[in-house]
Image: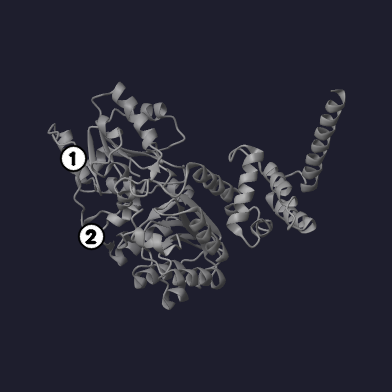
Amino acid sequence: MKQAQSNEIILTTLNARYMHTAFGLRYLYANLDELQSSAIIEEFTIQQRPIDIAEKLLQQQPKIIGFGVYIWNVEAISKTVELIKQVSPETVIVLGGPEVSHLPDMPAIVDIADYVVMGAAEKSFPELCRLILSAEKPLVKQIQSDELPLDQLQLPYQYYTDDDIKNRLIYVEASRGCPYKCEFCLSSLDKTSKPFELGRFLEEMDILYKRGARNFKFIDRTFNLKVSSSIAILEFFLQRMSDDLYLHFEVVPDKLPEKLKAVIKKFPHHSLQFEIGVQTFDEDIQVLISRKQDNAKTRDNLRWLRQETEAYIHADLIFGLPSDTLENFAQSFDQLVALEPHEIQLGILKRLRGVPLNRHNEEYQLRYNPEAPYNILCTRHIDFETMQRVNRFARYWDMIANSGRFKNTLPLILGGAPFERFMQLSDELYQTAGSTWRISLQRLFVLIFDNLRSRSDVDASILSEAMQRDYDRSGEKATFTSLIDKKNKVTRIGVANKRQKKVLQ
C-alpha cells in the first residue's frame, strides 16, 4: 500500500486474529479521493493491549482516527478510545461499523467518541473528514450515511499488500446485501442483494491472482442467489486452478440447480469450502424468525454435496432462538449429523444491535449477557444451567469433532443418538476436567478413552484400535499405550494410598 505523506487520518480496527484483514477499512481508504495521500491504515488484533495500540496511533499525531467497531472488538476499542481521549482529547474519534450503526441501540463507546457514521460510509466518511480538517466541524454527532451506487465505488483490492496476499485471508465480494429476512441476521435489514458488475469484479480477481493470491473468502451473504454469476465466478477460478487455490462461499442451502452442481463437481478435493447456515430444522421456529428454508431440499443438497463433490462443508446451527428447547435443538443436531458435513459450528444466539429478532425479547424472555459478545443466557424455554451445558457441548464439539483429530473415535462416541451421547460425554468431561480450556491433547485422549471404556455398549478392543489410529495421526511423541499405562499406574497408586490411609486410621 502507498505510504501516507502525512497521516492526518488513520483508519484502524482490531481484527480477531492476525490472519484476518479489515476489508471495510480498505473500502474507506479506496474512496477517500484527495484525502488518501494524508491517510493510512493501521490494523491491530484483540490480543494486543489497548495502551500499546493507543501509543502507536498517537505517535503519528493524527487529527482524525476512524475506528471500525464490531461485536468482537467493541470492548477493546472502548478501552483504547478512553485512553486516547485522556492523553489527546483534541484527536477527533470517528466510529463506524455494525456495532455503532443502529439508533437508539448504541454501546457506551459512542458517548466518548466525537462522531458516529452509521451504515456504509464510503461517501459520508470522506465528507466528514473534509469538514473536520477545514475547521467546519458538524454539530450533529450521529451521521446516517448515504450509500454510493456500486458502480461509483472505488474497489479496494489494490490495497491488499504483498504481505496480506502471502499470509492472510483475502476478503472479496461479488455482491452486497441479502434479499432474505432472517431476523437474527443484520442482513435482514437490507432491501435486496446488489451485484457488482461482473466483468469489473473478475478483472480485480485476476489482478489479485496474478499477484499471488490463492486464499479467497467471499463475504457475499447469498453467493448462489444469481446462478449465472455464481457459475461464471466458479469457472473463472477453475481456469486458474492450482494445488493451493482455496475458495470460501456462503451458500443458500436449498438452491443448487443442476447447472451449478455440474460446475461444483469439477473442483478438486477441498478447494471449495461452503458455509451453509442451516440454523434450525424446526419449521415453527423458522416461521417465527421469518426464515424461508425448504428443509427437504436443504437435506437433499447437503447429502449431494457430501456424496458427489469434493467440497468441504461447514454447516451452522444456532441454539437459543425464540421458542427453541433443548429437545428441538437435539433433533436439528441429529438430523445434521446424519448428513455428515465436515464441520458443524454450534452457535449460541447473540444479540446483534438493530436486528428484528429483538422484537421477541420480552415475549420469549430472551436474556443476554450485557457485555460483548452479548450471548444469550436464558430464555422462557431454556434455563441458565442448560444454556451453560450447551456452551460446554459446543466447546468440546470443536475440540473433538470439528478438529478432525478423532475421526475414527467419533462414531463410537455418537452411536445411534448423537446429541444425547455427546452431551453425556460433555457433562462427564467437564465433571472430570473442571474446564473446557487448557486441556492438552494427550490428556484429552486419556479422558475420552476413560469415558468410553466405561460404557457398556462400546467394545473395548474396537475402542482401543480406533483411538490408537487417531492418536497416531496426532503427531504426539509419546505412544498411546504409554499414556494409558501411565494413567492406570497413577490410578492404582491412588487407590493403594487410599486403602493404606484407611488401614492406618
Identify the residue at image location x=34%, y=38%.
12
- Residue 382: % across, % down: 46, 48
423 with respect to 83 (left or right): right
- Tell which of 154 and 475 is nearer to you: 475
Identify the residue at image location x=26%, y=44%.
101
Q: On the image, numbered disc 2 is attached to which residue?
A: 151
For residue 43, what is the image quadrant?
Answer: top left
For residue 253, what is the image quadrant?
Answer: bottom left
Q: For numbered disc 1, what is the local secondary structure? A: helix
Please, which residue is most extreme toward the bottom here?
A: 258
Which kind of residue does numbered mark 1 sit on? Answer: Leu
Image quarter hosting the C terminus = top right
Q: On the image, numbered disc 1 is attached to which residue?
A: 128
Above or below: residue 28 compared with residue 211:
above
Callout 1: 10 Å neighbours few (<14), some, many (20+)? some
- Tell which of 298 and 152 is nearer to you: 298
481 with respect to 101 (left or right): right
Q: Is residue 27 visible?
A: yes
Identify the residue at image location x=28%, y=48%.
30
Q: Calculate the distance from the C-alpha at mark 2 to the C-alpha at mark 1.
A: 22 Å
- Residue 449: % across, % down: 72, 49
184 with respect to 129 (left or right): right
Count all numbered tags in the image, as a single digit: 2
- Residue 416: % across, % down: 64, 63
- Residue 135: % across, % down: 13, 31
Q: Of marks 2 and 1, which one's residue comes earlier in the chain?
A: 1
